[in-house]
Amino acid sequence: MQTSEFAKMWSKLSKDYKLHMENELAPALTESQLTVLEVLSGQERMKPSDLTPLLATSPAAVTMLLDRMEKNGLIQRERDLNDRRIVWVSISEKGKNEVSRGLQIRDAFLSGVLSRISLHNQQLLVYLLGKITA
């Protein structure tokens, strides 16, 4: 089993990705904010509780993240008209622009990494990662 070698390579790739994303997204966006915006861009609106499992964090951390995002104009919050206990979160125009920018940054990094191997090996890598993350 190649666990030690896999761990080294996975760690290096993860660190390189995280550093690249932090540097390129700053100061307007964080990686967690990009994740929220990406999810919201595919939805009309969502409840904060729906975001908690996607971010693998606590409800309090999601609330703090959404507070910062709202303050920066990336999202909008509104109370439900029928049930004031429910708060809906939606992406703003600024958020749409930032998610587009963030996805371009991410895709450029991953394209650069994947360009080092053939298309066949890219497909094989995606297949194998799918097997171990299922």
Image (cartoon, rainbow, N blue to C red):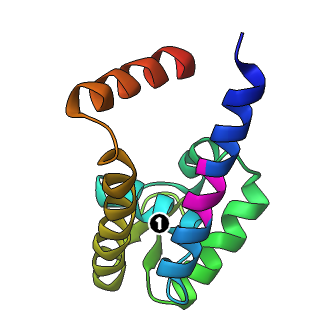
- For the record, the magenta segment spans 13-18
Q: Residue at x 50, y 87 (%)?
A: 28
Residue 106 within the magenta-colored segment of the rendering = no
The answer to whether residue 45 shows anywhere in this view is no
Give the mark count. Answer: 1
Q: Residue at x 55, y 22 (%)?
A: 133
Q: Secondary structure at mark 1?
A: helix
Q: Where residue 30 sits: x, y (%)?
A: 57, 74
Residue 7 in picture, x, y percent from top left: 73, 33
Amino acid beneath label 1: Leu
Task: Judge by depth and name the residue closer to the eye, 9 or 50.
Answer: 9
Q: Main secondary structure of the magenta part?
A: helix
Q: Which residue is located at x 65 percent, y 71 percent?
A: 65
Question: Can you give x and y, in whole percent of width and height, for residue 41 in the image?
Answer: 31, 60
**Quadrant in the picture for the N terminus:** top right
Query: What residue is at 40 percent from the left and 51 percent from the top?
Result: 113
The answer to whether residue 107 is above or below residue 118 is below
- Horizontally, is 32 left or right of 96 in the view? right
The foreground one among 73 and 33 is 33
Give the labeled residue for mark 1. 34
Taking 80 as reference, is 116 left or right? left
User: With respect to residue 75, does 131 lie above or below?
Assistant: above
Q: Quadrant of residue 80?
A: bottom left
Asked if residue 120 shows in the view, the reply is yes
Q: Nearer the viewer, residue 79 or 30?
A: 30
Q: Position of residue 59 (x, y in %)?
A: 73, 54
Task: Farthest residue to the left: give it.
Answer: 119
Q: Is residue 14 magenta?
A: yes
Q: Residues within 10 Å of mark 1 (few under 14, many from 20)?
A: many
Residue 108 sits in quarter: bottom left
